[in-house]
Image (cartoon, grey):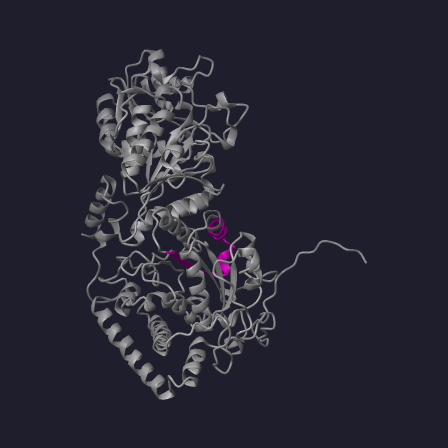
Amino acid sequence: MAQMNMVQALNSAMDVMLGRDPSVVLMGEDIGYFGGVFRVTEGLQRKYGEHRVLDTPIAEGGIVATAIGMAVNGLRPVAEIQFADYIYPGFDQICSELARLRYRSAGDFYAPVTIRTPCGGGIRGGQTHSQSPEAIFTHVSGLKVVMPSNPRDAKGLLITAIECDDPVIFLEPKRLYNGPFDGDPHKPAVPWSTHPKGEVDEGHYTVPFGRADVVRAGAAVTVVTYGTMVYVAAAAAAALGIDAEIIDLRSLVPLDVDTICRSVRKTGRCVIAHEATRLSGFGAEILSVIQEECFWDLEAPIQRVTGWDTPYPHAFEWEYFPGQKRVALALETVMEPT
Amino acid sequence: MNKRSRLHLPRAPARPGEAPDFGYVALSPAGAVARPDVNARARDVEDLAVNLVRVLDDAGAALGPWHPHLDAAELQVGLRHMLLTRLYDERMQRTQRAGKISFYIRSLGEEAVSVASCMALRPGDMLFPSYRNQGLHIARGMPLVDLMCQLLSNTRDMCKGRQLPVMYHSRAANIFSISGNLATQFPQAVGWAMAAAIKGEDHLAASWLGEGSSAEADFHHALLFASVYQAPAILNVVNNQWAISTFQGYAGGEQRSFAARGPGYGVPGVRVDGNDFLAVYAVTRWAAERARTGAGPTLIEHVTYRAAAHSTSDDPTRYRAKDDHLHWPLGDPIERLKRHLIRSGDWSEARHEALIAELEALVSASWKEAVSYGTMSEGPKLDPDLMFEDVFEKMPAHLIKQRDAMRRERG
């Protein structure tokens, strides 16, 4: 075991996989010589060579397309898109090609590509470095969509992604790279060394997709969340003294419906929280599943906590970000006696 | 006189009611273009993107440094593949008109592009076709029955009923799955070629797209990545002059040739007579040698003509001059190779007629077998459960649930 932040844990996952499997290659903008703008691939080109860790042109469509071709030819590419906000030029290759190749060729061709990309706000990144586009990819049949919230899960989920023969969109909440963040930008930053999930196994291990993590058991209300909002929601509930059960989904596709519903049946109340915008956000899907599966167990209408339906604003970051206040209001609303 | 900005609108040379005019097509005489060393640098061979590599002249003589000097037997195989492609197309077109398949795309007039390219490559080379490259599948020896079963979406359909007709693939024949989204295969082929180089293998990747879809960003990505990594790839632009009703001027072909985009990326671009079997073969062989000797990618523009409609869904008499393909200055690829073989004493009209009869019988027998595996209206049917398979490697819970719901819905 070692202390790692999320950057180091992700680096360790790729280090382990590059070492174990000669078909694994990394590719992306600035990821080779420089080690990535967030340092996630630092040292890996030096260790494994320029043929295994490729710097690429600034062309996300080209990165995804060539990754597909490489995967069809027996490699296992891990492509970094420098920011999730830059993924759109690769959108056709992801949705029309990567996601559907196995289906359209009846399993004769498939492309085990992992697309890693930093997402989310809280870093003063403005509208081009802060987006949370996960719902767009969950809407595409054939993609697995994952978002870890801590170093230990990040490493295990990334190894699962690389070993998986299906394409995976692997979203990394960049505000969590260096430490858990409870939504309060005025508090001093907390490093991962203070958190139990900053303890990471240095070897090979996996965290399976489709299994949510109950990060705090509770009886009063279920909070279904993922990414940065895991910490924001936990802090808000703690401040209110509400005995909330906090569920970190970890993977959105496949979705752990059983864990969500088991909890809601127990608590009868539910808040769903994500950073992404509200309209057609993934929260709407979770909400629909809950009302389909456990409507009669509900004591109150389900509440959603999300970013506002605007582009991510630079100057109004903390008015935009779904911080503890917004979560608290939702918790209080859902806890009102019926 | 006042100079001012203006919006230029490319004009097709001839629309319905007008006389065909192919004066815009820059030609070179057969045998006139020099054949540079395969390891030449892009900047030293830029004339290849301007001139037109041709081997066969109008009389059927093979001339000049690009003459590949193939055995008569090999040329006869090429003629056979092209004829089979054409007869298959004719029959499937009629079959669509009879309502037995939903859609079809012919490659009439472009048979040499696929067949000669394919024959110049090795079986281990990976092909990334567009939807008008059926000559590749035929030249790689895929049984017609397999292709027909795909068109029929029947119980032997390689795509299990998931793809529009003509979107074939074959893992065994190293032919990639065709996408209906244009140009996506171009940069994928470059990725495949990069992987071959990373693994130290001697295979190359070849891809084809139409001049119309060269407008997509994927074309740029393919050329860029191929150039940056010097990937062993052959990138083919099939300039058949038309993208449905849109003339090649709207893809940027008025100002410079499509081949000329290669040198802009540091990739040699070769403009070749796409209706000249020998020239297509020779240029592809040149590009393949480049790829296999570490000299990197080549862009080939095949100058040809889409003699038929885009697909069974459009009527070309609504947007271009009637029978204009009969005036195409580069003629017909099958007629030209036939003329060459007759001239060298290796073919005859009688053998040609006999071959047509043999291949027509093959097409008929294949169709008879294919329909025995089911058609859209009768015979055995694919199990609708297949709809839910292969979305992922293993079917996830939400798809199992939906599959079960569909079963209940069907009763």
Q: Position of residue A206 (x, y in %)?
A: 25, 31
Question: Per the image, is B115 magenta?
Answer: no
Position of B132 with respect to A269 (left or right) is: right
Task: Reply above or below: A276 against B153.
Answer: above
| Residue B178 falls in image quadrant | bottom left
Which of the two residues, B354 or B6, is positioned nearer the viewer here?
B354
Range drawn in magenta = B204-224
Residue beneath the point at 50% across and 29% down: A312
Does residue B312 appear in the picture of this structure? no
Which of the two residues, A15 or B148, is positioned nearer the viewer here?
A15
Q: Position of residue B117 (x, y in %)?
A: 40, 66
Q: Position of residue B406 (x, y in %)?
A: 23, 49
Position of B99 with respect to B332 (left or right) is: left
Q: Position of residue A142 (x, y in %)?
A: 31, 44
Residue beneath the point at 30% across and 20% down: A2
Q: Quadrant of the N terminus of chain A?
A: top left
Outermost residue toward the bottom? B350
